[in-house]
Amino acid sequence: MKGLALAALLPALVAAEHIRGVDPAFEDKYAPSLADFTCLDGSKTIPMSAVNDDYCDCPDGSDEPGTSACEGRPHAYFYCRNDGHIPARILSSRVNDGICDDACCDGSDEWATGACPNRCADIARAHKERIEREGKIRRTGAKIRGTYVAFAQKEKKRLQDEIAAKRVEVRERERQVAEAKAALENAEAQSRDDLERKKSSPLYKALEEHREAVKRLRDQLRATQDDLGTVLGILDELAKGYNPNGQDMAVKAAVVGYRELIGDAEPEGEETPEAKLHTVRAPDEHLSGFDVERVVNVDLESLLVDEAADDDDDGLLYRLEEYIPDSLYEYYYSAREAFVGALTSMGVLKKDVVAHDGPHVSAARERYNAAERELNAVRSAISGAEETLEQIGNRHWFGPEGEWKKLDGTCVDTVAGDYTYELCFFGKATQKSNKDHSSNNLGHFVEWNPAAKPGEYAYYTKMAYRNGAKCWNGPMRSVNVELECGKENALLAITEPEKCEYNFKVTSPALCWPLEDAGKPVVKEDVVSEAAKDEL
């Protein structure tokens, strides 16, 4: 029916000065003066009279630019001139479908019925007003963006100066570490020499001999106690089952002797037989005041050093030696040892001696450790500054001019329903309950728009936040951020197209590039893309 209705109009379509629906870029191929038409893909040549005859001859659909006969073919597009406004292309399937397409504001897509008036003047006026509004926002935002760029440049210069200064500081710190290490090694060598000298003294050798003797006596005592315990156990059982009328004299004598040992009677103030038996079996309990194990296990080398392990004991008394003249050091050393010995015997100082380092070695080691800590701190600061400096100059991260550095760590939020949503640039996205103040991690920033190249405007129009808290019976939470130019940093809207997958709409002056950099208006190819989706 549609084909019959158009039959009378087809000759006019072909004979017209401009064949309807043809893109100006290909008009030379559709010139009515030509006898034949070759399909744009070169696959076929047909008479010019077959163009726009409502029958699809070309595999690519290029012979029917003004009808819907070739819908779905690669070149089946209708070109809307939209004089006074922006030209557009739509799918040929939308030609004469009875619907006025906004993309074809001149109404040329419904040429068969003329049902769609030319609205291009009104649409162009509204479009111009919108462009002017957006231009005003962009100009204001661009000024703010300029301050972001200036901040990045100042930050870059500051970091460069800081790195240079800290590299100088590193050299000084390395010198201090080398000096502290040499001082420590010297102190340790002196301490070892002093220790070896004392270990060769008669006192040390005597202490070692006495300790070994105590150890042997302890071992012998334990062995004797074990044997005695066995014998006493046998006698105890014998005494309990002893029958004086049925045993020989040797057994009777043994039992009597055993009972005399432990005592049958319990005179006032004396031990019971059970207690006395326990005393016989474990005589070393009477030696509890004498710590045999401590004598055996004591570290004799620690007795030769000058300093206890407790930091409290390493006080003024030990630091005084730093100020003692060399000529008086031996006298001071003897006097100090006598004084410390007296304080120890009175219980003022602890008796336990566990440290092997003298005060000189401990002080030298602490100075060396402190110097190394300070050196590592400076190196760490340089590493952090270099990383930030690299990010500022890397368009993959903070933009072509480092403008996004200003927003590093800046957060924007908005209330949507029962929740407050927060987005921290280059940080974390969060969902906070307005009822119980609980929160969910929606993910951390991982990348810009992967579909565009770093440095292009489109690259900075999308941010991806991934690896948030796992959704109940669902995926890890994530956020796709759509950004556009705005006079302020703001989170405008929240949607959740899929479970636990959120879309944030955000504005920022950082995206207010100058118009020549942000891109110029182009033919509305996006209309074709959307239409193609509808066709599928």
Image (spheres, grey):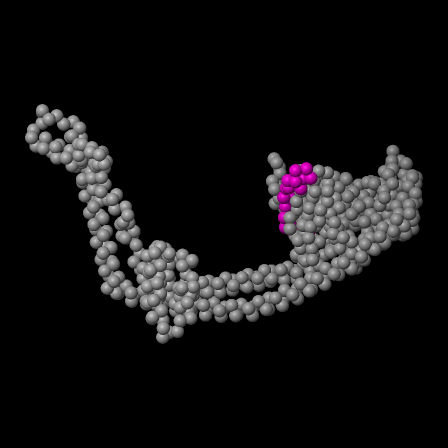
Going 68% across and 48% down the picture, which residue do you hit? Answer: 423
**For this view, does 7 lie left or right of residue 222?**
right
Q: Nearer the viewer, residue 248 or 90?
A: 248
**For this view, does 350 lie left or right of residue 140?**
left
Q: Nearer the viewer, residue 480 or 521?
A: 480
In this view, 137 is above or below 164: above
Q: Quadrant of residue 64?
A: top right
* Span of residues in magenta: 432-449
Query: Seen from this angle, which residue lies furthest left?
Result: 249
Q: Position of residue 467 (x, y in %)?
A: 61, 45
Q: Position of residue 49 (x, y in %)?
A: 87, 45
Going 40% across and 59% down the picture, which residue do you hit? Answer: 313
Specify whether residue 183 is in view.
yes
In this view, 461 is above or below 158: above
**For this view, does 426 lie left or right of residue 271?**
right
Q: Is residue 114 magenta?
A: no
Q: Quadrant of residue 149?
A: bottom right
Query: Seen from this angle, which residue lies furthest front?
Result: 268
In this view, 302 is above or below 41: below
Going 66% across and 62% down the picture, which residue do you hit? Answer: 393
Q: Is residue 438 magenta?
A: yes
**For this view, does 254 lie left or right of residue 414?**
left
Q: Position of residue 504 (x, y in %)?
A: 71, 45
* Chief SS of the magenta region: strand
Q: Position of residue 379 (x, y in %)?
A: 54, 63
Q: Quadrant of residue 421?
A: top right
Quadrant that contains the N terminus: top right
Quadrant that contains the C terminus: top right
Count of labels shown? 0
Specify whether residue 235 is in view.
no
